[in-house]
Image (cartoon, grey):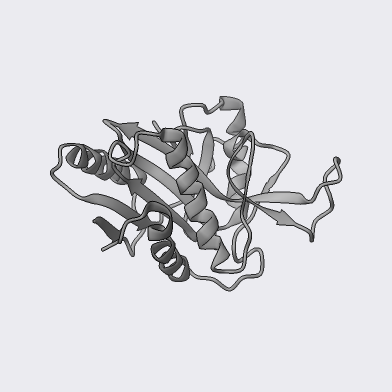
Amino acid sequence: MVEWITSEAVVEYEAAVSFMESRAAAIAAGQAPECIWLLEHPPLYTAGTSARIEDLTDPDRFPVYPSNRGGQYTYHGPGQRVIYVMLDVGRRGRDVRRFVQDLEAWVILTLSEFNLTGHIRDGRVGVWVERPDKPRRADGLLAEDKIAAIGIRLRKWVSFHGISINVEPDLSHFNGIVPCGIQEHGVTSLVDLGLPITLEDVDVALKRSFSAVFEQTPL
């Protein structure tokens, strides 16, 4: 069984990391159930293990936290649903690549509940949506914006960190970084796409979609 936790108030980043590390250790030791934590952070940037300092274009804008998750710079803040995923990957086949693909599939299935099609692109981590309302790219393809980021860490085959889905964040806050090191594509949100969706709506869709991907029944 998977325990679901939803925090109503914003959670400071360092407190979240401390909780995740403790919970992941307890899961690995068989002392606690797996856990999905839904929350928001105050405005901040995190630097993953592949972050390049030149991608932090406004270092004084918000606090910047080094992170032991994979990936580069990302933004967290109000209006963004952060989903911290503490799952036993060892019990789920010990296939990290497959696990990341399952996380991507979970996001895509969640977005589909709002009649939105998410895409995975080679060389671009996260989930993307096509923007027919924007000028086409130089290669003639539709413009694409990022709507969800994914970055995880494993310790003793238990995952932590996870996913962020842009519901209604202040998109200008992404301007202080090159999100995930990708300059040629933008960032969007569900509300920016014209969908009147709340964090609570996304939470319901996440819980409904979870068991279809991970074959588990959430608490």
Rendered location of residue 70, percent (x, y):
46, 32
Rendered location of residue 164, percent (x, y):
48, 51
Between 150 and 16, the one lying in front of the other is 150
Position of 117 with respect to 88 (left or right) is right
Q: Is residue 119 visible?
A: yes
Residue at image x 49%, y 43%? Answer: 101
Residue at image x 66%, y 69%? Answer: 194
Between 75 and 202, the one lying in front of the other is 202
Rendered location of residue 112, percent (x, y):
57, 64
Q: Residue furthest bottom?
A: 196
Position of 91 with respect to 200 (left or right) is left
Instruction: In the rendered view, tell whether residue 94 sits above or below residue 41.
Output: above
Position of 182 with respect to 97 (left or right) is right
Position of 27 with respect to 39 (left or right) is left
Q: Which quarter of the figure is the N terminus placed in?
A: bottom left
Between 160 and 191, the one lying in front of the other is 160
Residue at image x 55%, y 56%? Answer: 108
Instruction: In the rendered view, tell whether residue 211 sits above or below residue 62.
Output: below
Q: Residue furthest left?
A: 31
Q: Is residue 66 visible?
A: no
Residue at image x 84%, y 50%? Answer: 136
